[in-house]
Structure formats: C-alpha cells, structure tokens
Image (cartoon, grey):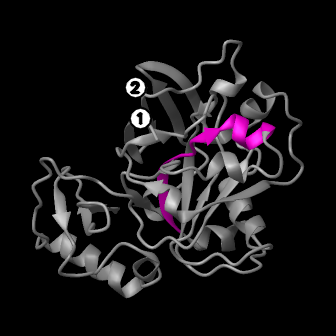
Amino acid sequence: MKLLRVGPVGAERPALLDEDGTLRDLSALVGDVDGGLLADGAALDRIRAALAAGVLPALDATGLRIGAPVGRIGKVVCIGLNYHGHAAETGAATPTEPVVFLKAPDTVVGPDDTVLVPRRSTKTDWEVELAIVIGRTARYLESDEQALAHVAGYAVAHDVSEREFQIERGGTWDKGKNCETFNPLGPWLVTADEVPDPQALGLRLWVNGELKQDGHTSDQIFPVAEVVRYVSQFMTLYPGDIINTGTPAGVAMGQPEPKPYLRAGDVVELEIDGLGRQRQELKDA
C-alpha cells in the first residue's frame, strides 16, 4: 500500500493512493498514519480489505497539500557516509561501523513544502535518501531477518544539510542537520511488502533541472537490514520512528570549486524507484 497524509500543516488526514492513482480517504477507518497504526496489524488489514472491496471514498487531489506520510514521529535516526561513492567524493575513509546521528522530528515537512535556507548559511547542500519507517518496537535485534520484520515500509527523504554549520562550527553534526524544514519526507509510505529488496532501488536528485545525484542502494556500505539491526543495539526503535539511510555520490560538498551550494530560488527535485517524487522551492529563512 501507499499510505499518505493530506491537508494543511497540522491538520493532515490519512489517505491511500490506489493502483489507479486515485487518492482515497482513510478517515473513517483510522485517525492518522502514525506509529499506532503501523503497529496495528488488524487496522492495516481493515484498510487492505476496504481497498479490495472498493469502498474507500475518493478525494479530489486538486490543490490538496501532501504532508509527511507519518505523523507524530518519535525520532529521526540518520546514517552518515553510507555509500561508497559518497565517502569517496568527500575524501572520507570508509566507515567500519555505521555513523549515527539524529535529526529532530520537527525538521520533517511535506515532500513539496518550502525548504528554508538558514540565516548566514553559505553551504546548504542536498542529499536524497531512502528512509526506513519502523513498524514494531525493536531492541537488540540479532539478525537481518529480525531487522526486516520490524520495518513497516519505506519513503523518500531529503536530508538537507548546512555543511559549514555541520563541519566548521565545532561540536557534532547536529547544527548542520537540524535547521527548520531540513527533512522533507514522502510523498508516500510504501509498505514493506511492496519493496521486496530495498537494495535494488535507484535514487536521483536534480537542482534546477540538472541531474546531480544518480545512485543506487546497492552501493550502500551498510544495507537496510544491517542498519536497523545495528541501531537497535544502541537505542530502542518504536513504531513510526524514521531512519534515513545515507546519500549517494553527487552532493555539492563533493564537487569542484566553486561548489554549487543551494540558494533561495533554487528548485530541488528528487525521487526513488517506486517510492515517489518530491519537489521543493528554496526560500530564505
């Protein structure tokens, strides 16, 4: 299934995109697409049954905002330097263990919402990423099979980053990763049954129509199953938590001088095979 949330900021309602591309209202069945729903197998089965029976009412998508596909996110865990190509372009050594950092849930916005260039920013960068959405509470998982069984689905994420804040301003990466609007997510949460192999997905990103990233999840240093298993050794993952799994080569930081960092007025578009497409216009904060 392709689950999503539509409507104004803070007042999104649950919806589903059917195989014909028709938007269907889920409000009569569930209150939201969130951790509670993702952990409730019976509720998900009711949605599937209603979809098969053809009883879900259609929504007029004209002018309807698409929000982040998951509400009430507990935490956003991120994996840095997780593609061989990206590590090479930045001159970083290949990690021997996953590089883990956190983004605040309030960085998450809809897939087509405005992205704000922070004040005094000189190095705002793009990063298309595969996002994992957790569906079952995960603690100390022992195998790849266990890890994948705890995944509810996948989504497109844009891990926007300010490189000067991240690298040159002291401390951890957090200052360059947690600026307002720095994690567009969606348009859909595609349930795991529709993504049989998360290591078989192409990822692409364009800036002002120019292709900048054209990668593949097979280039990940630590694949999806290992990422979930590994993170569960250090923190408890709850239904509705998000894991951004890193970006392929092609970011601004890895390009020759003068590096083409983002500015107000730029348009970024990104997509992952089967998971949908995003489009953001940048404005000054």
- Residue wearing tag 2: 265
**Crowding near pointer 2: few (<14 within 10 Å), some, many (20+)?**
few
Towards the viewer: 145 or 32:
32
Q: Is residue 80 left or right of residue 241?
A: right
Boundaries of the magenta span:
152-168
Q: Position of residue 273 (x, y in %)?
A: 45, 41
State yes or no: residue 274 in magenta: no
- Residue wearing tag 1: 283
Q: Residue at x 72, y 35 (%)?
A: 164
Can residue 237 be spotted in the picture? yes
Q: In the figure, 12 relative to 221: above or below?
A: below
Q: Disc 1, disc 2: CB below 8 Å?
A: yes
Q: Residue at x 67, y 12 (%)?
A: 258
Towards the viewer: 183 or 37:
183
Outermost residue on the top side: it is 257
Marker count (numbered): 2
